[in-house]
């Protein structure tokens, strides 16, 4: 029972939930204000404009938010006008549908951030399709109301973003900390001697990929503004989180040895210690709910002492056992990581002053700078360009959906079919496949709930449910699309109920329309496809290049702070990118199972290499005073050169299979620290050789 309040708080204190709540409030204010000032139908038209623009209202950095919402407003108005006026000339309207699909597909070249903007375009177009305009004047009147609603919501969104800028940054930081806690729990599972190795290790890599995504979102938001004290405090907190993550990651360097260790009691002790760190991270996450929070570090001093003493006692009985050495190294790193978690608490505390870290680093280099400018759009008009091929697929699918409704007007409605196609179809097959089933099942559930609500609840409650459904569908758009489909179906059917109450017919129509749209999205996904397997060799080469840069930065006695951090970020991002590629590849038809197995093996080996490289700064930090500087520097330099040569994508394969020369390690004896360094360098070179060998497999190159 003690953890119940924390569980509830963690479940509620989420960026997507507060974003959905903000959207619901904005749409509700817009529709209610227009309805009270004019009439009910005017309120619905204005709310439609608010709903379309709200699709692009995400938790983005403030400066970026202004541009995104501005583009969303202009796009919503343009595509509403295009749909409203082109419908008076059927051939022009067919061309308008084709253009909408082509435009939405082409702008996907600008990256993930534009997906919401693309849906704003589609939603504005299909909402206008659902309206009946006897004359051009009626269409113009609707457009004016739509523009007023869209402008009202855009203004509300920008003002809210300015007022709650710090709240949004805290939410994104909390999401990164939450992902780190989940990563720690996945790591603790590996120290559970009763768990299955491959599945548990895969779960750890998936948790790492999710953490990398959350960390990047936090970097983009927090590093964008650093003028005020609280902004600097948030940056200090994120950097402390990154330091803790790196130290925990470095402890995975001996994971293969520990997984097969017979010392079950030591493994359980590590498991419990990592779970304690995860609990502490969750506690600190909730401290972000307050702007000026106060936190005190909760050091696990007694637990750390017991862990180290337990390992020391075992080591005295078997001083030369390499497994015990691995336990010692891992425990030392985890204890150091626990001290970084304490530093994280200190950075969160409002009583402490911000550090000078933000001033000493060029933080703009760590932000994700997506493609921009009209030139990129023009470069997509090539037959092999993925965005162009996706645009052609989407345009033809939407045109086919429209033609079906023209041929069978009694059995299908174009706007719902086109919306289903646009929501389901994505540039890669895997996402399209998953969203297809989420859309179908979500629509079935949403329609059933809508019918129940209409038959049992009064009109004022139904209006409130529309606002709640809009906020819910928005909140879970990037988290759980099935919930989004449920909310969208409820809000759409309830809106239609107030315009033309024929619930039973609309219920079955929506089901049929959804099935038609899902079928078309599936069929056209095979037209000019962009298979993930075509990009895998390039992804692997990018992985090797990032590994080589990370090795160059990590294998040094003195680490340049900015160069090392940037190289580490790119290497870990490359691991996450390959992890995502493997998941998408597994969903593709006729996927090569041998290739999937090889890629999975490469992913695991590369994760361990990243852990090995991350362990070097930690090792130097822990044992710097005991190292023979000259001998260590020579050995590290020689291993660095060999590792970088191994990780070159065009390296000769025969050289990758040769055993590493040992002459550079002969001078590393004489102290325990030098022997530890020698073992670590040998392990890193072995890990790099394994990664290079796996990446050079013909089954991957010929995938």
Image (cartoon, rainbow, N blue to C red):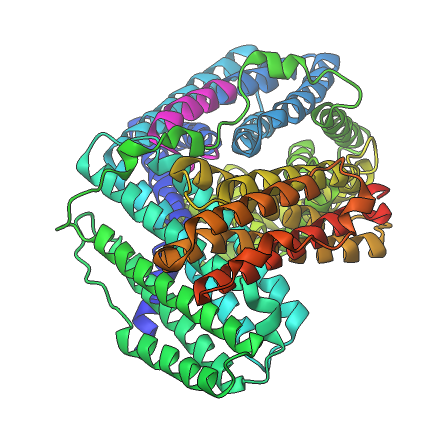
Determine whether, in the image, residue 127 is placed left or right of residue 582: left
Q: Main secondary structure of the magenta part?
A: helix
Rendered position, 616 above or below 532: below
User: Which image quarter is the N terminus in?
Assistant: bottom left
Determine whether, in the image, residue 99 is placed left or right of residue 623: right
Q: Nearer the viewer, residue 40 or 556?
A: 556
Rendered position, 449 above or below 473: below
Residue 108 location (% of width, % of height): 62, 28
* Residue at (66% x, 58% y) in the render: 604
Q: Residue 89 appears in which quarter of the rendering?
A: top right
Q: Residue 285 appears in which quarter of the rendering?
A: bottom left
Q: Nearer the viewer, residue 251 or 84?
A: 251
Q: Nearer the viewer, residue 521 or 465?
A: 521
* Residue at (78% x, 55% y) in the render: 598
* Residue at (34% x, 55% y) in the render: 13
Rendered position, 516 above or below 676: above
Query: Outermost residue, left direction?
Result: 351
Residue 3 location (% of width, % of height): 33, 75
Report the span colored magenta.
54-75
Is residue 72 within the magenta segment? yes
Q: Is residue 139 visible?
A: yes
* Residue at (83% x, 46% y) in the render: 654
Determine whether, in the image, residue 581 is placed left or right of residue 257: right
Is residue 26 within the magenta segment? no
Determine whether, in the image, residue 228 is placed left or right of residue 698: left
Counting labels gives 0
Q: Nearer the viewer, residue 267 or 578?
A: 267
Residue 449 location (% of width, % of height): 54, 57
User: Which image quarter is the C terminus in?
Assistant: top right
Q: Is residue 34 visible?
A: no
Residue 568 location (% of width, % of height): 50, 43
């Amino acid at each position: 029972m003690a953890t119940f309040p924390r569980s509830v708080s963690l479940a509620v204190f989420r960026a997507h939930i507060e974003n959905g709540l903000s959207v619901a409030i904005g749409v509700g204010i817009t529709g209610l204000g227009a309805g009270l000032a004019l009439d009910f139908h005017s309120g619905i038209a204005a709310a439609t404009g608010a709903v379309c623009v709200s699709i692009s209202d995400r938790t983005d950095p403030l400066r970026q938010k202004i541009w995104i919402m501005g583009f969303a407003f202009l796009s919503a108005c343009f595509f509403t006008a295009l749909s409203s006026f082109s419908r008076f000339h059927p051939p022009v309207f067919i061309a308008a549908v084709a253009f909408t699909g082509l435009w939405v597909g082409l702008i996907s070249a600008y990256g993930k951030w534009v997906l919401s903007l693309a849906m704003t375009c589609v939603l504005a177009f299909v909402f206008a399709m659902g309206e009946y305009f006897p004359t051009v004047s009626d269409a113009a009147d609707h457009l004016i109301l739509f523009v007023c609603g869209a402008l009202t919501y855009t203004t509300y969104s920008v003002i809210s973003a300015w007022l709650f800028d710090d709240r949004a940054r805290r939410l994104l930081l909390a999401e990164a900390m939450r992902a780190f806690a989940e990563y720690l729990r996945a790591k603790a599972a590996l120290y559970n001697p009763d768990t299955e190795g491959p599945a548990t290790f895969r779960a750890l890599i998936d948790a790492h990929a999710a953490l990398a995504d959350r960390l990047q979102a936090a970097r983009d938001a927090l590093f964008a503004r650093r003028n005020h004290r609280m902004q600097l405090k948030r940056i200090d907190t994120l950097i402390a989180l990154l330091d803790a993550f790196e130290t925990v990651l470095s402890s995975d360097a001996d994971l293969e040895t520990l997984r097969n260790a017979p010392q079950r009691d030591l493994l359980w002790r590590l498991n419990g210690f990592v779970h304690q760190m995860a609990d502490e991270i969750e506690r600190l996450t909730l401290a972000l709910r307050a702007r000026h929070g106060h936190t005190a570090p909760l050091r696990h001093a007694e637990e750390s002492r017991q862990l180290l003493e337990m390992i020391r006692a075992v080591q005295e009985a078997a001083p030369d056992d390499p497994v015990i050495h691995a336990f010692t190294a891992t425990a030392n790193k985890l204890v150091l990581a626990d001290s970084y978690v304490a530093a994280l608490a200190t950075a969160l505390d409002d009583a402490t002053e911000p550090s000078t870290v933000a001033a000493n680093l060029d933080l703009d280099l760590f932000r994700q700078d997506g493609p921009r400018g009209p030139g990129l759009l023009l470069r997509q008009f090539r037959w092999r360009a993925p965005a162009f091929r996706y645009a052609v697929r989407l345009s033809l699918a939407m045109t086919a959906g429209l033609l079906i409704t023209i041929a069978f007007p009694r059995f299908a409605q174009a706007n719902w079919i086109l919306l289903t196609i646009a929501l389901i179809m994505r540039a890669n097959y895997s996402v399209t496949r998953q969203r297809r089933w989420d859309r179908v099942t979500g629509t079935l559930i949403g329609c059933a709930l809508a019918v129940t609500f209409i038959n049992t609840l009064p009109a004022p409650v139904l209006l409130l449910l529309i606002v709640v459904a809009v906020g819910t569908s928005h909140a879970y758009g990037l988290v759980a699309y099935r919930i989004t489909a449920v909310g969208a179906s409820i809000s759409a059917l309830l809106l239609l109920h107030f315009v033309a109450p024929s619930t039973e017919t609309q219920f079955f129509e929506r089901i049929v329309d959804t099935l038609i749209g899902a079928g078309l999205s599936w069929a056209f996904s095979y037209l000019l496809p962009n298979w993930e397997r075509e990009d895998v060799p390039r992804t692997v080469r990018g992985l090797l290049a990032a590994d080589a840069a990370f090795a160059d930065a990590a294998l040094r006695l003195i680490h340049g702070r900015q160069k090392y951090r940037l190289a580490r970020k790119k290497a870990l991002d490359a691991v996450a990118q390959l992890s995502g590629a493997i998941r998408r590849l597994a969903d593709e038809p006729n996927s090569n199972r041998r290739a999937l197995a090889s890629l999975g093996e490469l992913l695991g080996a590369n994760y361990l290499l990243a852990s090995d490289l991350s362990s070097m700064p930690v090792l130097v930090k822990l044992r710097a005073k005991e190292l023979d500087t000259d001998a260590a520097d020579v050995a590290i330099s020689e291993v660095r050169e060999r590792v970088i040569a191994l990780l070159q994508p065009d390296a000769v394969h025969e050289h990758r299979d040769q055993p590493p020369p040992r002459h550079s390690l002969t001078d590393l004896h004489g102290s325990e620290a030098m022997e530890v360094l020698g073992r670590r360098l040998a392990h890193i070179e072995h890990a790099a050789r394994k990664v290079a060998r796996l990446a050079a497999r013909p089954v991957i190159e010929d995938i």
